Image: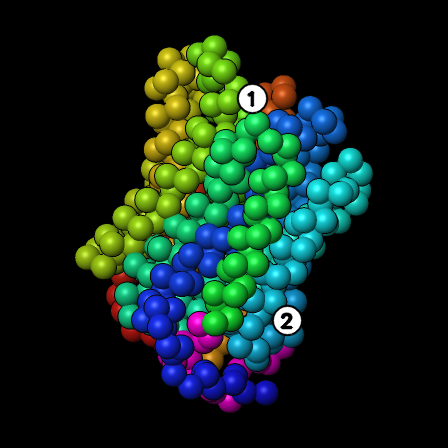
Amino acid sequence: MPTPAPEAGPPAGWIGRHPVTVIVLAQLFGTSLWFSINGVAVSLHRETGLTEAGLGLLTVGVQAGFITGTLLLAGTGLADRVRASRLFAGAAVAGALVNAAFILTAHDLTLAWVLRFVTGLCLAGIYPLGMKLVVSWTPKHAGAALGWLLGMLTLGIALPHLLRGVTLDLPWQWPMAISSLLALLAAVMVRRLGDGPHLPATAGAGRPWAGLGAFARRPFRAAALGYFGHCWELFAFWTLVPLLVLRELLRLEWPLPWLPWLAFAVIGVGAIGCVLGGRLSRRTGSLRVARWALGISGTLCLVYPWLGHLPPAFLLLLLGLWGLTVIADSPQFTALASLSAPRDRLGAALAMMNAVGFALTIPSIAVVTRLWPTQELAVLWLMLPGPVLGLWALGRVRAEDYVTRR
């Protein structure tokens, strides 16, 4: 079944004049669901007895749901058969409702895990479809535009920590409820915008497992392998950020209310890395930016455990540098993949790449959270194989391989 043609013309008003801004803001609001429980982890521990391992289990539940959702999108061809704006809006509404339902079930770990799994399913309709929407509105300079999009993803994941900081005197249910309201707003924005005009209907769209064909292309395969290595490191790091920050707060003897603010800063600064990387990509190319960002974050994986005895303030600055670079390569991997994937199977190819990449986050998150209580900083070395794989893959291609869309 062919991809439906885009809706006729952009909507009137501000939304129609600034489509990329609308999409990136919707991405910010929608992805606040991703780590919504991580922002209130301390309160959940106090009220429900949630341990570090339990937090890791719930985080893995989101990842498992996301993987399942992306595989469903790619396997059924829905990613290229149904309008991206409709899928995004529907997923955001469903995610908002499921996230709100978690408030009533937090004391039951099994039921809470199921709801976080369903939240991940919904996020599969937000993140990959957001990337497709950006490409549909601005195929030129995709690295820069996707830099903004992934910047908003980063802020969205950091947002629960900020929400907890500003609602510290309120019950933990408040920031969870605010995340749900933001996701509903994201659905309204994207549904009002619709799809862009740059993904015309083609005969091959929507075939089951059509995205697998992209892996036969060497440039796409290299970008995907780089992305896989990046994913192994990224979400394990984001999951550990509250624990890494708490370690330094205790050494500084600072009050615990600093924790959500500093955790937000360490994760949220990645938005700046995404935007700066996007701008650099317009001058130096996405491949070079991805190599540099992955190289810096991988170096921090290697050296940070050896620096654990240094002053806490210095280590907090290093965490900020890590947060800046650990996500800066992600939009560039997506840009490289979108340049080398078959045009009629772009949605399915990106969904498939996301599915494999996020599958790798499950063992990395599970291992580092399980071993943190006994190994602490040494668990960071377990994240190092990701950057090593990514840099090896990127070393096997040239910038010329991504000059034109294949």
Using the image, determine if residue 145 lies above or below residue 208: above
Relative to residue 2, is residue 218 drawn left or right? left
> Which secondary structure, mark 2?
helix
> Which secondary structure, mark 1?
helix
Q: Nearer the viewer, residue 120 or 292?
A: 120
Question: Mark 1 — residue?
Answer: 376
Is residue 61 found inside the magenta-colored segment of the image? no
Which quadrant of the figure contains the C terminus?
bottom left
Task: Please name the amino acid that badge 2 sits on.
Answer: Gly
Question: How many numbered marks, from 0 up?
Answer: 2
For the stretch drawn in magenta, the main secondary structure is: loop
Residues drawn in magenta:
193-210
Among the two numbered marks 1 and 2 on one chain, the one whose residue lies closer to the N terminus: 2
Relative to residue 377, is residue 367 drawn left or right? right
Q: Nearer the viewer, residue 191 or 285?
A: 191
Question: Mark 2 — residue?
Answer: 75
Q: Which x, y percent locates residue 116? A: 68, 48
Residue at (57% x, 47% y) in the render: 179
Q: Which x, y percent locates residue 283? A: 19, 57
